[in-house]
Image (tube, grey):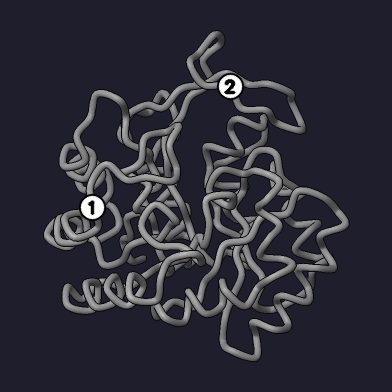
Amino acid sequence: MRLSLSVRIAELQDRKDRAAMPIEELAPLAQRSGFRGLSMRASVVSVDSPEDRVAHVRRLLDDLGLAVSMVTGDVALAANTPDAARILHEPEPYFRLAERLGCDLIRVMLRSAQEVELVRRVCDAGRERGLRLAHQTHWGTLFETVDGTLEVVRRVDRPNFGVTFEPSNLLICGDDYGRAAIERLAPHLFNVYFQNMRILPGGPIVWQTLTRGPVAADYVTLQDSSGIDVATTISALGDVGYDGWFTIHQPLRPDQSVAEAVREAQAAVARLVA
């Protein structure tokens, strides 16, 4: 596995359009902390960014020897809003952004069964350019459960369409997120995200799931086993032969600096992934 850091680590939980630390500081910090890639989001660069901004980010990462593990091309995809379907209707800007960043993996989000045919067409267009599409296991989408995820993957039926496994969203939606889930999803894994949450009745954050309705939870530190056990997750991924990116996707907590969050991420996973 290769260790990646989502630029979300410099975003507060409720702000996905702005980073608390500029990429010019975050990227060197990630590189010094042992991360080999960054998962890119619209808080740094998006399909609406000027060309010179995209080129600047690419040069910065190339100079540091950092890859882009995945591209989330706009704020709507990060925030899970209805506008997340834009990529399904206008894929070209997302393709171009990924290509200019040297990345072959693009995030998509499906919120209705009617979008399955659209994503097939985007997959076909992307395959001609060596691009892949990944959908995260995520509340409020067709990928809230392992069964639902596998059903949509079967229906899309494209070799360049796969899954970003993220266990906390499966936890929130009331589904299995452990070894059995990883074994079932293994043939379709393109990427792995890790953030750590626990169900907390009356908690500060409420997710509007399709399977369970509103679910209250909270973020915990990456090494807190009262949420998801990161060591068990990495062990199970290794046992199924997963050798792609393992990306820390934890948002910045209100009481944290970005530097503290990166140190926490490095301490939680670097030894386990190595």
* Residue 191 % position (x, y): 50, 62
* Residue 19 % position (x, y): 32, 45
55 or 234, nearer to the observer: 55
* Residue 22 % position (x, y): 23, 52
Identify the amino acid type marked 2: Val
Q: Is residue 145 visible?
A: no
Crowding near the residue tagged with mark 2, few <14, some 14–19, many ≥20 C-alpha atoms within 10 Å: some
Q: Is residue 41 left or right of residue 131?
A: left
The image shows residue 206, relative to residue 192, as above or below, that is above
**SS class of the residue under badge 2?**
strand
Which mark is first along the chain, 2 or 1? 1
Q: Is residue 2 left or right of residue 186?
A: left
Label 1 to label 2, Cα distance in Å?
29 Å
Disc 1: which residue = 22
The image shows residue 111, relative to residue 261, as above or below, that is below
Identify the amino acid type marked 1: Pro
The residue at 48%/74% (across/down) is: 97
Crowding near the residue tagged with mark 1, few <14, some 14–19, many ≥20 C-alpha atoms within 10 Å: few
The image shows residue 30, relative to residue 187, as above or below, that is above
Farthest right residue in view: 114
Which mark is in front, 1 or 2? 1
Farthest bottom residue in view: 128
Specify the quadrant that holds the C terminus. bottom left
Disc 2: which residue = 206
The residue at 67%/51% (across/down) is: 83
